[in-house]
């Protein structure tokens, strides 16, 4: 028994010694990191990538003090999942501000596929923060193969254009560089135009995102004296018009007018594309009236076949508000009554807003209401009132009856209480209303007082009517009618 026990222990030890050690598999790291940043600007992101490769991707969105946000303004990074013409397989919606729990820096992981993604900020008023990300095919995580790079030269008469193209099926192209006639290596971002007459040598190379650099390639070419050939594409611009709200959104239809100019062969055609649809010949302003966000791409071609770079106009259309057909709500209330009464008229309108309030006291004319009305003439009175909103809807006329009891100060005992203002035998037809203190308009005109001359009487009437017009008791037309009647009279002669 003892021997068997030792033998079993030895066998167990041998088995443990030769057993393989199992380790967890190493997880592949994301193929790339893409970073968006924001600051105090509501019209565009501070920085944003434009190109990427397929595969698992780390997305960093930072909107913090470090990226220039000094106000605490929030932004979102949202991937579009509805607009035609774009990839819809990434549902990303990150809200970031300097004061959130991540101090404005957020990181997440998504998987990108080949194609084009559209991203934007969803916060109202930030609707012009929008862009596109073009994703091309990626490769394996471990990349030891340098990019394939080539160059083509076009033109030569007057100038030559060197276009460098690089591809990398592994980690993707990182940088492309070029060198002209032995000069310094320069980062390639767009076709290089060489206009110096003579023979030239262009060298080029590319480095992928894994650090592999290709062997330099070369191309020789000659630039000759220029001729009158047109090699310049047209200039094309877009102008968007329509009613806009405070956030820059278009309320109802938006009209996009495209204009192109070409100083050489002239413009042959302008084309546009709405929301990734087919390219269409432009003949008249493009009307966009569907509620939502829209992208209008456009380009122009001249008669020599030169086509401008594709450009884009971003438009957000919102539904117009409902038409206002409801008049204001208007009320009136009287206070006091012992010696004088004060009438206050109030109007509200939830649609377009109140434009004017009017009132008529007793048999007086309609007068614009600007302040509470004080009535001191003893007796029963009726105040009619109404209001009109900014769309022209007028409320039905209403009335308020009230009484002023004797006891207040009557500035004009034995008032002239005729219904209209009469000067001599000339009835002006203007209502002889109470002006306060118990005095009517006729009391203030005082046609039976003594005046040195007729002109002095007319000047007195002019002064009285000017004051009553300023107070809103008379309209300018009514004041003119009374002054002309005074001028026709013989009072003061």
Image (tube, helix red, strand yellow):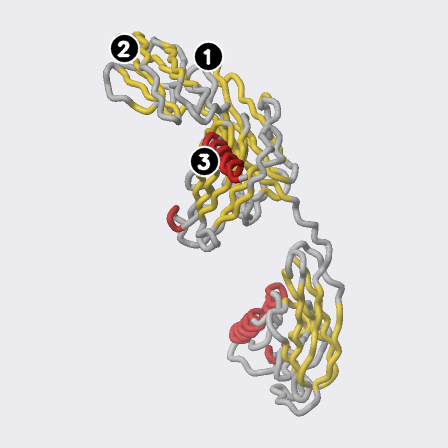
Look at discs 3 and 1 and give the one toward the viewer.
3
Do callouts 3 and 1 mark residues in contact (Cβ within 8 Å)?
Answer: no
Quadrant containing the N terminus in the rendered view: top right
Q: Secondary structure beneath disc 1?
A: loop
State the separation of the CA atoms marked 1 and 2: 26 Å
**Image position of 308 with respect to 316: above or below:** above
Where does the image place residue 466, in percent across and percent down from the top left? 55, 70
Q: Secondary structure beneath disc 2?
A: strand
Q: Which sits earlier in the primary sequence, circle 3 or circle 1?
A: 3
Quadrant containing the C terminus in the rendered view: bottom right
Residue drawn at (33%, 21%) of the image: 177
**Picture quadrant where residue 232 is located:** top left
**Residue at the limit of the structure toward the bottom, as seen here:** 407
**Picture quadrant where residue 448 is located:** bottom right
Q: Which sits earlier in the primary sequence, circle 3 or circle 2?
A: 3
Nearer to me, 363 or 231 = 231
Drawn side of residue 85 relative to residue 400, left or right: left
Residue that badge 3 annotates = 34
Look at discs 3 and 2 and give the one toward the viewer.
3
Where does the image place residue 203, in percent across and percent down from the top left? 30, 14
State the separation of the CA atoms marked 3 and 1: 40 Å
**Picture quadrant where residue 195 is located:** top left
Drawn side of residue 34 relative to residue 116, left or right: left
Residue that badge 2 annotates = 200
Mark seen at residue 304: 1
């Amino acid at each position: 028994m003892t021997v068997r026990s030792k033998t079993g222990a030895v066998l167990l030890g041998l088995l443990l010694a030769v057993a393989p050690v199992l380790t967890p598999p190493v997880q592949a790291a994301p193929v790339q990191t893409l970073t968006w940043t924001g600051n105090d600007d509501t019209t565009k992101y501070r920085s944003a990538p434009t190109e990427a490769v397929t595969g698992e991707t780390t997305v960093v969105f930072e909107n913090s003090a470090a990226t220039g946000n000094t106000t605490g303004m929030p932004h979102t990074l949202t991937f579009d999942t509805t607009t035609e013409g774009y990839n819809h397989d990434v549902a990303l919606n990150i809200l970031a501000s300097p004061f959130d729990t991540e101090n404005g820096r957020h990181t997440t992981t998504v998987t990108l596929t080949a194609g084009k993604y559209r991203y934007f900020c969803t916060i109202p008023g930030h609707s012009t923060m929008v862009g596109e990300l073009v994703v091309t095919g990626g490769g394996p995580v471990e990349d030891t193969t340098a990019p394939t790079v080539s160059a083509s030269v076009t033109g030569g008469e007057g100038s030559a254009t060197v276009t460098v193209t690089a591809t990398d099926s592994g980690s993707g192209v990182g940088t492309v560089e070029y060198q002209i006639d032995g000069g310094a290596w320069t980062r390639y971002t767009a076709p290089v135009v060489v206009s110096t007459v003579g023979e030239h040598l262009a060298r080029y190379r590319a480095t992928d995102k894994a650090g592999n650099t290709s062997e330099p390639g070369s191309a020789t070419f000659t630039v000759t004296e220029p001729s009158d050939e047109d090699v310049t594409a047209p200039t094309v611009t877009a102008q968007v018009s329509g009613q806009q709200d405070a956030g820059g959104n278009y309320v109802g239809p938006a009209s996009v007018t495209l204009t192109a100019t070409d100083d050489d062969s002239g413009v042959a055609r302008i084309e546009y594309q709405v929301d990734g649809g087919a390219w269409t010949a432009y003949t008249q302003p493009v009307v966009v009236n569907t509620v939502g966000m829209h992208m209008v791409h456009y380009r122009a071609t001249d008669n020599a076949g030169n086509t401008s770079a594709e450009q884009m106009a971003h438009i957000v259309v919102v539904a117009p508000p409902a038409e206002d057909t409801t008049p204001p709500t208007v009320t009136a209330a009287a206070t006091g009554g012992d010696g004088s009464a004060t009438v206050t008229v109030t109007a509200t309108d939830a649609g377009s807003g109140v434009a004017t309030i009017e009132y008529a006291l007793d048999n007086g004319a309609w007068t614009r209401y600007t302040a509470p009305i004080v009535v001191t003439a003893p007796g029963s009175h009726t105040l009619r009132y109404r209001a009109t909103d900014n769309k022209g809807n007028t409320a039905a006329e209403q009335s308020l009856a009230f009484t002023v009891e004797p006891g207040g100060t009557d500035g004009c005992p034995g008032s002239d209480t005729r219904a209209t203002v009469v000067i001599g035998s000339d009835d002006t037809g203007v209502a002889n209303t109470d002006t306060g203190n118990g005095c009517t308009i006729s009391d203030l005109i005082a046609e039976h007082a003594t005046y040195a001359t007729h002109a002095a009487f007319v000047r007195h009437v002019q002064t009285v009517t000017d004051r009553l017009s300023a107070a809103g008791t008379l309209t300018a037309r009514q004041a003119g009618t009374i002054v002309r009647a005074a001028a026709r009279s013989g009072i003061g002669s």
